[in-house]
Image (cartoon, grey):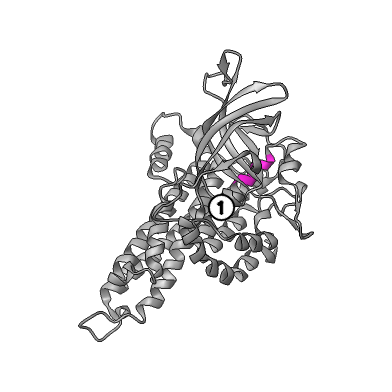
Amino acid sequence: MSDSLLSKARALRGAIELGAATAETQRRVDAGVIDQLNAAGLFAMNIPTAYGGAQAPAPESLQVLEELAYADSAVGWCSMIYSTTAVLGSFLEEPWGSAVYGSICGSDGQTRSPLTAGAAAPSGKGRVVEGGVVVSGRWAWGSGTHHCDWICGGATVEEGDDIRRFDNGEPKVHVMFFEREQVALQDNWDPSGLRGTGSVDFEVDEQFVPDGRWTVLGQSKRQIDEPLYRFPFFGYFAAAVACVPLGIARRAVDDFDDLSRGKVPAATTSTINQSSIVQLEFGQAEAMVQAAHTYLYGAVEGVWEKLMQQQRPSLEDRRQLRLAASSATLLCAQAVDKLYNAAGGTALQGHCSLQKHFRDIHAATQHRMVGSEVLRMAAAARITDEAVSYQL
């Protein structure tokens, strides 16, 4: 990786941490922090070089996401959404690929990367009209949409007497790209964890999307044939989601280390880092995080090496990506639980970062890309005849 992306992410840690409290109260990442990350080129990681992006190798872009999550979970989460949505740029035909993902010149004369986010769930309905499709719908989980230039929403499309379908009868899901001005953001995000992600519902009402400003999941052909975009999309998406819990858990380990050296429980004279029970819990937690990191990056790097050698990832490769991402998320959550419990009553206090790590990581475990159902699905792909390979 150019020495820039990861080093710039680390250099911005202080600014990100300063904005974390604001993100918690505003329930969205501060716009100033987003501007700094964009100016550093961190949102260009997965944008194709053909559109002016960095097109960073998959393992290295994931390192950046983990580093950003280490600094603040909300920044890591929103960056993950922007980065994974940008991969869709490789499926957009011209002129929409360059129109959506080409660099933008701001009012200050500086160029910046466009930000895209949204939800692929087919919560919208469209109908064919001359020159495109008119869409209405409301989607949940619009993380980071307050700062976006384009917002995506999945929709089924009526044409004639039926919706567009695949030959097997399954509905075609069109991921529509809406201009920011076409979308209404709701104010309904007030969760316990990942508060700063601004994951509000968003809505469109009878909005026109011109022909081609969409991708069809499972059908659209890749327009940019490079290793990053040949990486199994759901595998990369799941790995990117898992990098946020990895960053949170790694930060929790470091924060607990600091806390344990200063906390002296009531009726004792020594700090908790001298307790053999605490030492055991800490050792187990640290090992869990390291194991999660090794499994996830090992699976990612194995697929990346194949892609660089012009080989196609196998079903087993894709299965391992999903297993690694879900396992990493669950292991990291268990590690944070251990640290939270070992800290005792201190972890309950607002000034203690462990309570935030606890809230945030348990919010991250709810994402469907890394949930326990994925472990079942991946197992079914191996030990039964269940046809789940298309979901991997």
Residue 381 position, x and y percent, is 43, 35
Q: Could you tell me which quadrant the N terminus lies in? A: bottom right
Viewer-side residue, 221 vs 341: 341
- For disc 1, the neighbor class at 10 Å (few under 14, some 14 to 19, many from 20) is many
Image label count? 1
Q: Look at the picture and state if 175 lies above or below 257.
A: above
Residue at the image point whose x is 51% and y is 44% from the top: 186
* Horizontal arrangement in the rendering, residue 67 relative to residue 249 (left or right): right
Q: Taking 9 as reference, is 221 above or below it?
A: above
Q: Magenta: predominant secondary structure element?
A: helix
**Does the segment drawn in magenta span residue 277?**
no
Amino acid carrying label 1: it is Met
Residue 390, image x and y in percent? 52, 32
In the image as oriented, which residue stretches furthest toward the right?
109
Which residue sits furthest bottom?
269
Region in magenta: 85-90
Q: Is residue 341 above or below residue 54?
A: below
Q: Is residue 173 visible?
A: no
Q: Is residue 89 magenta?
A: yes
Q: Residue at left 60%, top 63%?
A: 33
Residue pushed farthest left?
267
267 vs 340, left or right, is left
Among the 4 quarters of the image, the one containing residue 100: top right
Secondary structure of the residue carrying tag 1 is: helix
What residue is at 41 percent from the left and 77 percent from the top? 258
Residue 307's place in the image compared with 328, above or below, is above
Front position in the image: 164 or 351: 351
Residue annotated with mark 1:
80
Q: Is residue 374 left or right of residue 204?
A: left
